[in-house]
Image (cartoon, coloured by chain):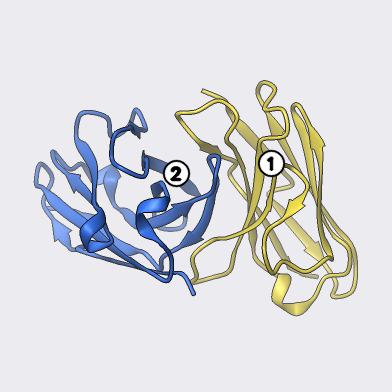
Chain colours: A blue, B yellow
Amino acid sequence: EVHLVESGGVVVQPGGSLRLSCVASGFTFDDYAMHWVRQAPGKGLEWVSFINWDGGSTYYADSVKGRFTISRDNSKNSLYLQMNSLRTEDTALYYCAKAGRTGTAVHWGQGTLVTVSS
Amino acid sequence: EIVMTQSPATLSVSPGERATLSCWASQSVSSNLAWYQQKPGQAPRLLIYGASTRATGIPARFSGSGSGTEFTLTISSLQSEDFAVYYCQQYNNWPPITFGPGTKVDIK
């Protein structure tokens, strides 16, 4: 069974930095691309970032480009999101998701909450 | 960026009735359209991809149709566990991947 567990969400001040982690199990991690998707409180889903199986291709939403960096360590079955220059509008539940062959998100973790507030 | 819209925002349906949810794309996404279900306090779950293919383990009462810019998710006979928010998502022209704002299906 696919299992994705996110961690690292905390309360951080505007301008601060944070690194989220996602540990995967139940599938061959380095066979799959991964996504980060976020959801602000009471709002809809917003795609954040994508990384291919070996980290050679990465994509970002315009709202986070230049501030967030996605990466992975296949030896640790882990996905990361380095978040810098955080803004209040980055407050959200951040989900990692296993990608389908195309751009779908087939399996999701339960999310980790990031709150950006002074 | 492709903008996704969904209608209605809220759909009130009685258990056992049929529910029809609509999704539109601002430009053609071919059949590269997915539907997700999200229940309160839970992560989203993939229901449909390729506009009409059910994901693994999804009951047959869920069906998707459409192509280009207009899509429909139909739940043939609503069960209690189907009351949730449903999002459409395009993956034809990305980045960025874009989601619709969601349709909440609640009990009438």
- Quarter of the image that includes the C terminus of chain B: bottom right
Residue B106: x and y in percent read: 72, 67
Horizontal side of B82 relative to B46 (left or right) equals right
Residue A32 image position (x, y, % from top left): 42, 50
Toward the viewer: A91 or B108? Answer: A91
Query: Would residue A39 be visible to someone looking at this image?
Result: no
Q: Position of residue A113 (x, y in %)?
A: 29, 62
The circle drawn on residue A38 is none
Q: Is residue B12 above or below residue A30?
A: below
Q: Residue at x 28, y 46 (%)?
A: A90
Q: Nearer the viewer, residue B72 or A16?
A: B72
- Residue visible at 66% across and 35% down? B32
Which quadrant of the figure has residue A59?
A: top left
In the picture of the structure, the residue carrying the numbered disc 1 is B6
- Where does the image place residue A26, in percent across and percent down from the top left? 42, 71
B92 relative to A27 in the view: left or right: right
Element assignment for label 1 = strand
- Residue at 58% x, 28% y is B3
Instruction: Residue at 70%, 22% (x, y): give it.
Output: B28
Tell me the kind of residue under disc 1.
Gln
The residue pinned by badge 2 equals A46
* Same chain for the residues under marks 1 and 2 in the image: no
User: Quadrant location of residue A93?
Assistant: bottom left
Q: Badge 2: how crowded within 10 Å, few (<14), some, or many (20+)?
A: many
- Asked if the residue at tag 2 contacts the one at tag 1, i.e. Cβ–Cβ closer than 8 Å, the answer is no
Q: Mark 2 falls within which chain?
A: A
Spatial CA distance of label 1 from label 2 is 15 Å
